[in-house]
Structures are given as structure tokens and as C-alpha cells.
Amino acid sequence: MVNKNITSIDDLSVKDINLISNQAIKFKNSKKIQVAKNSKNIFNLFLEPSTRTTVSFELAAKKLGYNSININFEKSSLSKGETFTDTMNTLISMKPDALIIRDKTNFSPQNISKHLNIPVINAGDGTNEHPTQALLDFCVIKSIYKNKKISIGLCGDIKHSRVAHSNIKLFTKLGYKLHLIAPSYFIDKNEVNKINPNIIYHKNLKKINDLDVLMMLRVQKERIPKNGKNMMNSFKKDYCLLSEHLSSKPYLMHPGPVNRNIEISDNVLDNYPKSLILNQVEMGVYLRMACLKYLLK
Ligand code: CP
């Protein structure tokens, strides 16, 4: 039997997305979660920094009664010069039941999954995708709007954002109306049009008043060119979200971590009543439980 993976939103059908999201919302609303009869060993290999994704995968595995084994770059023999292939062979010899991987190289989880017969979850690969973030974002929206096809806007560094790429794929697959708000240096329209030629583009924040949900995206400082300081300053000046932009009161999301006063002002981040940013963090645990259940049942 071919094992299932979540290395991209492309791995999932609409039916899979609905199955996983319904399970995540059910987990969130459950008073007691039944632990699995047979424990599993889940290896979390994080080769880029993370707070939300790494902790939520660990907690998700533990809530299901599984063992969660965390490996990060600094504490692994990769930092002593062991090659990636040798590290992978070493880990696989210990027979994990699933591998969760975050890596700076695009398509690394997809490439690894081709050589393994266990499920692989992409916890973020370079600028490519972060499918479990998009799934949890969808769960938060679904918890409020059920199956209503609302208007969603993504604003910021779309070009370098793996979260944006997975969200564009997911919401396109589900038939939502998408708006992208970004300066030209933070968007590659040819790339986006390949996923969805019907996306509506905006160059400023004026149109956000037509949106039900506005998702601000982190400026990926570590992925923009060394001379990108001008981009940061220019973005901050024209796109940093202030309370005056939010007169129509859309729900506000951000995958985190936020660059305060670059994407969102302190005032909005600390006081906006329709912020869902911490709801996203909370849903991350239940969504990752649902992903593990989907892959390991
Ligand atoms: N959203 C997200 O991936 O956050 P972390 O980098 O903290 O995991």
C-alpha cells in the first residue's frame, strides 16, 4: 500500500481537507480525547527555528498517546558536519512511524518521502509550502463561518511565504474568493496565476474593507536579499496595519511570528478585538492531532 503524506496541499483532496478539518474541530470541542491503544514514534526534525509548529506537533502526538522525539539542528550531529543523507539513514534505522520535517530547502520533505515507506509531514520547506499552517488557518475560519465561501485577503511578503503558497492552494481548491495585497517586490504574479488565474490583486490596503478575513504575512527577513532593508522600510511605511485601516472590522489573522510594527502595529496586535492570531496557535495543536490521526490510522 502507498503511504499517505502531507508534504503539500497538492497531496490532499477536498474530501481529505474536510475530513481533517472536521476532525480537528471535533478534537477542539472534545472534553476528553481517547488515547491510541498502540503507541507510535513520531520524529520531529526541525532544521529551521520554530515555536508554534514544533510545540504543537509535540503536544499533538502526546495528546494522542504517541511518543514525540524532537531533533533540532543545533543538538544533532548535522551541526558536527554529518551529511543530511547520513542523518536521515540514522534516523530511519530507528524505525519511526512518521517523520515531520522543517527544512530551509524547497521540496526537501517531498524528496525524502519518495525514499520512505512511512508518512512524512512538511512542517515548512523554504519558500515553498507549510500545508499544516494552511489547514489550521482553514479550521479557524471554518469554526466561525462553517462552509460559507467568504472573501479572504492575504497581505505582505507573498513571494517568500510558504504559508501564503499553501493557503492560496487550499482556498483555491475549496472555491473561496482570494485577494492578494502586496507591493510588486513581494509578489510573483506569474507563479500565483499558475495556481489560480482568478485571484484579485491590490497594491494598497484600501480594499481590505471588502474582506471578511485579512491575513497578514510575516516579512521573511531571512529569505529576502541582503540589500532588502529598503524593502522592509518601504513595506512598513505603506502596509503596516494600523487601527485606521480596520474600520469595517474584518477578522485578523497572522501565522506568526509577527514582526511588530512591520506587518502589524503594536496597537492593533495588542488591542484589536477581532484578532484570531492566538486562536490560530490553539487550533494548531488540534489540527496536527487530526493530521497524525489521518496518516496513522
Ligand atoms: N507559523 C509558524 O510556522 O510558526 P513557527 O515558525 O513558530 O513554527
Image (cartoon, rainbow, N blue to C red):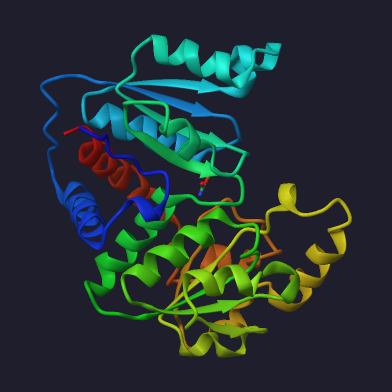
Please provide percent x and percent y for residue 172: 39, 71
User: In this rendering, does residue 247 appear at all?
Assistant: no
Name the quarter where the C terminus is drawn: top left
Look at 33% across and 43% down and name the residue there.
285
Residue 274 versus residue 162: which sits nearer the camera? 162
Relative to 187, does residue 88 appear above or below in the rendering? above
Q: Measured from the top left, where is residue 249 in percent x and y?
A: 46, 82
Q: Residue at x 27, y 40 (%)?
A: 289
Residue 259: percent from left, percent from top:
67, 56
Q: How many marks?
A: 0
Q: Position of residue 145 (x, y in %)?
A: 26, 74
Vertical order, 211 against 223 (above or below) = below
Q: Which quarter of the figure has residue 41?
A: top left
User: In this view of the protein, which residue sits in the foreground, 122 or 288?
Assistant: 122
Q: Is residue 217 above or below residue 5?
A: below
Residue 183 lies in what quarter of the image?
bottom right
Q: Quadrant of the N terminus?
A: top left
Identified at 39% across, 60% down, the residue is 137
93 sits left or right of 73 in the view: left
Q: Can residue 25 be spotted in the picture?
A: yes
Q: Relative to 106, is 222 on the left or the right?
A: right
For the point 32% across and 32% down, which residue is it? 119
Relative side of 7 to 102, left or right: left
